[in-house]
Image (cartoon, rainbow, N blue to C red):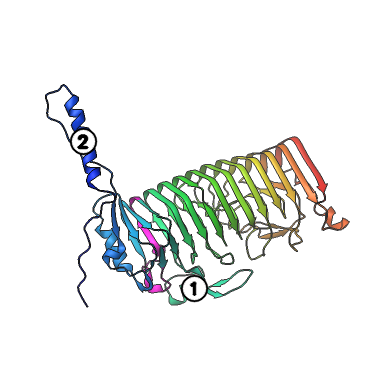
Amino acid sequence: MATASPPPLLLLQSATVTLIFFPFLLTLLHSTSATSSSPPTIELFRNLTAALSVTDFGATGDGVTYDTSAIQSAIDSCCTTPCHVTFPRGGTYLTATIRLKSGVVLHIEEGATLRGGTRLRDYPIEQERWYVVLAENATDVGITGGGVVDGQGLEFVKRFDEKKNVMVSWNSTGACLGDECRPRLVGFIDCRNVKLSNIELRQPAYWCLHIVRCESITIQDVSIYGDFNTPNNDGIDIEDSNNTVITRCHIDTGDDAICPKTYTGPLYNLTVTNCWIRTKSSAIKLGSASWFDFKGLVFDNITIADSHRGLGFQIRDGGNVSDVIFSNINISTRYYDQSWWGRAEPIYVTTCPRDPYSKEGSISNLLFVNISANSENGIFLSGSKKGLLSDLRFINLNLTYSRRTNNVGGLVDYRPGCQGLVKHSTAGFIMEHINGLVFDNIYMRWSDEQWSAEQLGQWNNPLDFRSSTVNNISMVSFHSSLYTQ
């Protein structure tokens, strides 16, 4: 085999003679007009981005040969920051786990695909590092370029099922425990200044984008496509991370779409705007991992389409939630199957202990404003004896309740943990263990087309609550009526 020529040490994008000469000329003109006799200072141009192509390091991009070594060599060869490691269009670059370092951005060009391997040996020994792309303790890192990162999630399906796929688990090898032993797609752990933009994340085998204990994260113009019948293929999981912005994202996946969690520390200052979501689970869900607090979250201008649950809180581990705003959100929910948590609730706010050893967290100061929903079920608001819901405000809600499937209702879903599934008649709002609740300008409509008189009597109850557990309610302009399409 012929010896390949060594890769270039550095390729400077747009580093032409013009770029070098132009700042020199400006400096020269400025110096000639100055009256000072001191010699002119020539400042070289700054902030040019280095670019290294993985093909210059031996990547084939044929989708069959593993390009891991070539990709990692390109990353490791970055000696200036920022440095873009580029994947030329037209190639499919098969890889085991690759690790980013500070200052490196993967630039996957439109028409190029970075594809994760499906073998256990493609990933590190430690299960917590099973990612196709992984950055740890790095700053100024990200992914961009218009291309695709593909996890080949369908290769992990053991049996296809329209209700819920049965997945491969590597627990049989002894490498891990439980039935969720599959690699995630992209992970940033203990990083600062993370940015993902203009990229498609496709078919994760497990969680898609995982942000862990990071600071200052931007996720912009990212599309996520997971198989709709695959469990645990969450869109974006934000764990113990602060100062995060998610905007203009399109998420279409089987499990939770945007899921803040707290395992080892609090989560605060999360803003999500201008997103479109479809999921067979919760579109937005806080929890269920909730050992620490959530504070200062904003969700605005979001469309939730045909999802099993809309806006969800599953606080189960003693963490507290406060200061959360949901505004300008259009929700459509429908029932899929009991194997998925949820009963097609447009809004679901719950706190209760996961098990007898768990603490009870509280949820306070929530604002829901300018919300429209077309749903198969009502809104469920449930605190617990030592974990009240307090200061909840619902302003300008337009709620339409109609049946789209054969689900007959009659169950409340407390899962995970707590009481599990409990028989309970359907209502527009089901409420328990609340102190401080405001309804202002609520329009609730009930479809009567698909129901007998007996069934309708079990369905069109606007409010259901035990007065002994719900206190300090204010209602202004609350409307409830039937309608025929």
Say above or below: 156 vs 318. Answer: below
Residue 120: horizontal and vertical position, in percent? 40, 73
Marker disc for residue 118: none
- Residue shown at the point (16%, 21%) measured from the top left: 35
Q: Which one is earlier in the sequence, the residue at label 1 or at label 2?
A: 2
Residue placed most toward the observer, 400 or 13: 13
Q: Is residue 385 left or right of residue 479?
A: left
Residue 414: horizontal and vertical position, in percent? 65, 56
Say above or below: 49 vs 170. Answer: above
Residue 137: horizontal and vertical position, in percent? 33, 53
Say above or below: 323 vs 220. Answer: above
Residue placed most toward the observer, 234 or 328: 328
Q: Quadrant of the N terminus?
A: bottom left
Using the rendered view, name the quadrant where residue 337 is placed. bottom right
Q: Is residue 55 magenta?
A: no
Mark toward the viewer: 1 or 2:
2
Using the rendered view, name the quadrant where residue 41 is placed. top left
Using the rendered view, name the quadrant where residue 440 is placed. top right
The boundaries of the magenta stretch are 116-140
Name the residue tied to disc 2: 25
